[in-house]
Amino acid sequence: MPVVIFDMDGVLYRGSSVMPHARETLERLRRAGWQVFFATNNSTSTREEYVQQLRTLRLGGDVEHIVTSGYATAHYLERLDPKPRDVYVLGANGLREEIRATGISVRDASLVPGLEPPDAVVADGVDPGAMRRYLTSVSLPSPADTVVVGLDLHLTYAKRKPEPFLFEEVLRRAHERDAIVVGDSTDYDMVAAHRVGARGVLILTGLTEGPAVQHARGDAMPDRVIKSLDQLFTLPEFAGL
């Protein structure tokens, strides 16, 4: 049987309005024996939710003839060898549910850090240091074996920062593990540096001011502090240069 695949939003409907001739076209194809499939790059909803939407719009269709990006991703993961055992999703619950339906374990959305930052943290221009202080208090989850990124309308710095991969890639390309990171943030640069085993030099010309260093804790504490780049060469690590 011949197959036709329709994108949905913008082709068959827009919002709650059915596009002109959509119903007649689908019906005609079905009567002619065509397999009518629906596809969407939107991963926020499950196939079952799309079935209900299509029925509400009187466009027909069933779950076996709907493919979403979430569904496709789930079955891509299912075919991997070895199969993922711990998936961390940045996206909507529809994507999580599609992956779980294949039997793969997915972390619950409530375990994603930074979902509900305090008002003072997200208020624009009120307290520039609030987000940095908040991030140091967020408990980050253990690393997952697979990360899937879909549409996330509430993406925050706390879900993806500080991410040490940038520094990891530098060390990989340099074929070295011993490194020094010079940065202007305790909560981003210093934390990421320490997570890859590097030493962190904080320069007080950017995001962090002198008094704020006193409040740094744990991985956020710099190994060295300088006020300008010329002071870099006063440090023991750069002696003789």
Image: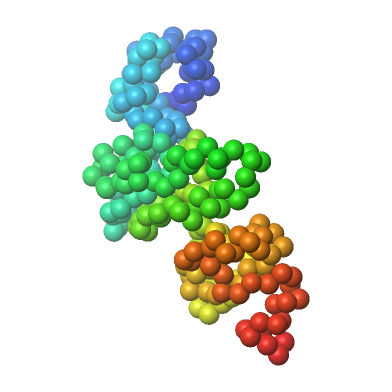
Depth check, front residue: 65 or 141 = 141
Measured as percent of width and height from the top left, residue 20 is found at: 52, 10
Figure check: 10 above or below 57:
below
Measured as percent of width and height from the top left, residue 154 is found at: 49, 37
Quarter of the rendering occupied by the N terminus: top left
Identify the residue at image location x=56%, y=70%: 222
Measured as percent of width and height from the top left, residue 76 is found at: 35, 47
Identify the residue at image location x=27%, y=48%: 105
> Is 203 left, or right, of 64 in this rendering?
right
Figure check: 231 above or below 169:
below
Farthest right residue in view:
230
Depth check, front residue: 141 or 171 = 141
Farthest bottom residue in view:
240
Quarter of the rendering occupied by the C terminus: bottom right
Q: Quadrant of residue 234?
A: bottom right
Identify the residue at image location x=26%, y=47%: 104
Depth check, front residue: 164 or 105 = 164
Q: Quadrant of residue 182?
A: bottom right
What's the colour scheme? rainbow
Measured as percent of width and height from the top left, residue 176 is found at: 53, 79
Figure check: 36 above or below 27:
below
Residue 82 visible (yes or no): yes
Q: Quadrant of residue 206?
A: bottom right
> Is 223 left, or right, of 205 in this rendering?
left
